[in-house]
Image (cartoon, rainbow, N blue to C red):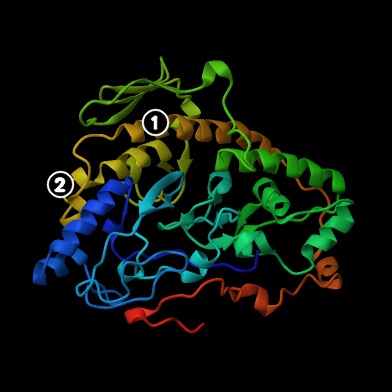
């Protein structure tokens, strides 16, 4: 997957939130502020200020391309993003508010696209490589789209790789097949996520079967299929609703119950409660610096961030009571973590067998990858409005 894009740099944390209503409130407060108060709330950086205009994001209806202070316009509809590992949140899609929005990713964002995200921290193991349908918009690491153009066109793969694999394995090979193989056989290495390619058609088919199960779990279903579920007696359900605001998140090992104040979800397997991703900053999700971050704790902490005594300005705006929709998200998240934990031993034991060599890939013309394949494709599917209403020349 030669075309890689650095992660988005938001520049200000208030542009993302776990619920869209909070973002609309923050927009309204900022749009109604004036002078020094507006600057304080906006949190200007070297790249973005309240007075600077910016181009419209590709594929998004921008209220204005003039400076926010001059013409904020109506609030754009928040879009769903992957903000942290296994944590889907919402983002204000206005380039005037984002330090580095990566427009090349917005140009290829559609219902066909899948984004692979390499971990920002080394040693990520099986839980580190993320795959999402949503635009990755947090501090996640390098992003590799599966397709270089909208509509699932032009796979982001080395030219000539798919025909070579189809010939070697005796059947058609799609871009999504390669992604499934990456999930099964890829491992973190000194140069990033390294993917050995097997020379054995039987090992290819075995890896493909495992990778498809991994992809279905990460995406909670693919190609319109039902999301994978735990067996009947292990499926988590919301047993009681949260009233008010929960004072913490805890887990009872005897009853396998996840508690959020008065709310409960069960059964929650130990593997889901203890599921970690690497690279946690100090204090995140209850982790010390350099250790793993428990996904469920981090998910809960992100939804309580606006209540932190240190939260200031727009970051301190959020729901007064715990939204029921957040509790409803938990069973699906617990299921994903539990299923990935169940698949981890099988994935760790998977071996690709005899490999295609660099020399063989070079002889087939797959290597070296041409420079053009490492750059974004020219996508001109729609006109893009530049700062001040001028249309951008691409």
Can residue 356 be seen here? no
Q: Quadrant of residue 36?
A: bottom left
* Residue drawn where x is 26% and y is 53% of the image: 24
Q: How many marks?
A: 2
Which mark is nearer the camera, 1 or 2? 1
In percent of the image, x 42 and y 58: which residue is there? 137
Location of residue 49 with respect to 199 vertically, above or below: below
On the image, the x and y values in percent for residue 86 come to 46, 44
Label 1: few (<14), some (14–19) or many (≥20) C-alpha neighbours in 10 Å: some
State the residue at coordinates (71%, 49%): 181
Disc marking residue 359:
none
Residue under numbered circle 1? 328
Q: Is residue 54 above or below residue 101?
A: below
Residue 360 visible within the image: yes
Left or right of residue 235: residue 206: right
Helix, strand or loop at label 1? It is: helix
Q: Viewer-proximal residue, 375 or 363? A: 375
Q: How far is disc 1 from disc 2 in space, using C-alphas?
A: 27 Å
Q: Can you say whether 355 is above or below 100 in the image?
A: above
Q: Nearer the viewer, residue 362 or 266?
A: 266
Residue 347, percent from left and from top: 66, 40
Q: Quadrant for the N terminus, please.
A: bottom right
Position in image of residue 48 (x %, y %):
29, 74
The residue shown at (60%, 63%) is 150
Which residue matches tag 2? 309
Q: Is residue 384 left or right of residue 145?
A: left
Mark with earlier residue (1, 2): 2
Tag 2, which secondary structure? loop
């Amino acid at each position: 997957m030669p075309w890689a894009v650095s992660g988005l740099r938001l520049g200000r944390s208030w542009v993302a939130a776990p619920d869209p209503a909070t973002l609309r409130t923050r927009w309204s407060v900022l749009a109604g502020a004036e002078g020094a108060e507006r600057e304080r709330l906006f949190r200007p950086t070297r790249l973005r200020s309240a007075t600077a205009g910016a181009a419209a994001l590709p594929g998004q209806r921008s209220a204005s391309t003039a400076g926010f202070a001059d013409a904020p316009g109506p609030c754009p509809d928040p879009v769903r993003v992957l903000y942290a590992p296994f944590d889907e949140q919402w983002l204000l899609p206005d380039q005037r508010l984002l330090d580095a929005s990566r427009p090349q990713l917005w140009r290829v964002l559609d219902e066909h696209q899948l984004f692979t995200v390499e971990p920002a921290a080394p040693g990520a193991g099986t839980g580190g490589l993320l795959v999402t349908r949503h635009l990755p918009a947090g501090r996640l690491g390098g992003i590799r789209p599966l397709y270089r153009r909208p509509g699932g066109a032009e796979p982001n793969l080395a030219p000539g790789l798919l025909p070579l694999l189809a010939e070697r394995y005796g059947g058609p090979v799609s871009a999504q097949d390669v992604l499934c193989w990456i999930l099964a056989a890829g491992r973190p290495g000194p140069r990033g996520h390294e993917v050995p390619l097997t020379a054995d058609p039987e090992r290819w088919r075995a890896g493909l079967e495992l990778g498809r199960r991994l992809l279905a779990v990460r995406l909670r279903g693919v190609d319109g299929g039902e999301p994978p579920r735990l067996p009947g007696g292990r499926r988590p359900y919301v047993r009681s609703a949260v009233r008010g605001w929960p004072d913490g998140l805890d887990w009872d090992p005897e009853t396998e119950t996840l508690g959020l104040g008065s709310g409960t979800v069960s059964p929650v397997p130990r593997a889901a409660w203890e599921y970690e991703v690497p690279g946690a900053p100090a204090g995140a999700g209850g982790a010390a610096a350099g250790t793993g971050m428990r996904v469920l704790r981090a998910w809960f902490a992100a939804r309580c961030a606006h209540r932190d005594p240190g939260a200031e300005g727009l970051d301190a705006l959020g729901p007064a009571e715990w939204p029921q929709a957040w509790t409803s998200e938990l069973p699906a998240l617990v299921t994903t973590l539990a299923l990935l934990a169940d698949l981890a031993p099988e994935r760790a034991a998977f071996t690709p067998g005899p490999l295609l060599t660099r020399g063989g890939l070079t002889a087939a013309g797959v290597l070296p990858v041409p420079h053009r394949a490492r750059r974004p494709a020219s996508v001109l599917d729609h006109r893009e409005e530049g700062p001040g209403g001028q249309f951008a020349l691409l």
